[in-house]
Each structure stands twice: as C-alpha cells, then as structure tokens.
Amino acid sequence: MKQLQTILLVIFLFFGCNQPEARRPVSVKTGSFIDRSVALNKTLNNEQHERIQQIIQNNPDTKFIVSPNGFWYYYNVEVEGDSITPKFGDIVNFNYDVTDFNNTTIYSLEELKIQNYAMDQEELFSGLREGLKLMKAGETITFLFPSDKAYGYYGDENKIGTNIPIICKVTINKITQKQTN
C-alpha cells in the first residue's frame, strides 16, 4: 500500500509540474469590420464637413467661427465687455431650437421650452454642452453641429435619426453661478 502511494505521488508530481500550454484560437479574425467602420465614418464626416462649407459659402456676410471642439458657429447677438461664461456647476437658463441643414424645423422653441442646465452635471449632447461654455447671458449663437457632435449614431430616438447633422439657435437667458462654501 505504501508503494502504491509513493508511485501515485511520483506520477502526480511528474504531471503536475508541467507548464500550462497556451490554447490557440479556433478562428482568426481580422480587423475588416473595424476597417470598414472607420472608412464609413471618415466618408460621413467628410460629407458633413463639405455640407457645412457650402452653408458657409452661401452666407458670405456671416462671420462663422470654427470651434476647437469640432463645430462651427456665429453670433446672432453678441454681448461685449466683461460678462461671465458658465463654469462647472453653474445653472444655465437657455432656450434653443433645432433644424436640419435644409432649415427644416426638427424641434421648435415652443417644443423645447426654456431649459435649466447644471453645467457638466446633467446629460446634454456634446456639441451643445461645449457651445454653452462659449456663451454669456443675453447672447444668441447659431451652431452648426456635425452628427458626431450632435446625436451621433443613435439619434435622439424620437425626431432626429442616425448620423444627422443639426443647426441649433441658442439663447442664454441667465447664468446662476454655483454657490461655493
């Protein structure tokens, strides 16, 4: 019996000390889906930027500004002089409308009503969130957002579909600064 235990122990040690072997994948996938997706997104992005350039060329009297955040805008009403722009936590009271690049109204001022937004603490599509940071109380700015700065691939699941670039005319009524203790 003692010999059997010794033999089993030797067998166990012999087979138990082997290094595990890496398993090879059953199938090898290439990046073809990702490559196609990147190509489609580049094409879509170029088309939308060309459309924005057409809008700019069709409005030579309007001074468009390119944002480093990937959208274009112009002032309808600009406030000169010292005034605050919203910072993290400030409450911004604003109203806006949404149209497509053919000037068809998607959401009117009446539909969207006056909004109160806590800067960077609530959900808002990225273009508008960044656009509000550029504004002062009393200003009205028209923004041209490519779809990646608007509602992107998913749309708003209501009136704005997949990959739709939009124009928003935004007015900030009031900025209430965050109270610090």
Image: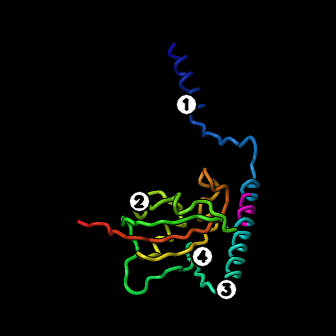
Q: Amino acid at mark 2?
A: Gln
Q: CA distance from mark 1 to mark 2?
A: 60 Å
Q: State the residue at coordinates (66%, 55%).
A: 161
Is 68 magenta? The answer is: no
- Label located before the other in sequence (3 or 1): 1
Q: State the residue at coordinates (70%, 68%).
A: 102
Residue wearing tag 4? 72
| Residues at marks 2 and 4 touching, judged by CB atoms closer than 8 Å | no
Left or right of residue 92: residue 35: right
Q: Amino acid at mark 1?
A: Leu
Q: Residues within 10 Å of mark 2 (few under 14, many from 20)?
A: few
Q: Position of residue 69 (x, y in %)?
A: 55, 72
Residue wearing tag 1? 13
Residue wearing tag 2? 121
Q: For this rendering, which residue is in front, 17 or 60?
A: 60
Q: CA distance from mark 3 to mark 1?
A: 83 Å
Mark closer to the observer (3, 1): 3
Residue lying furthest top: 1
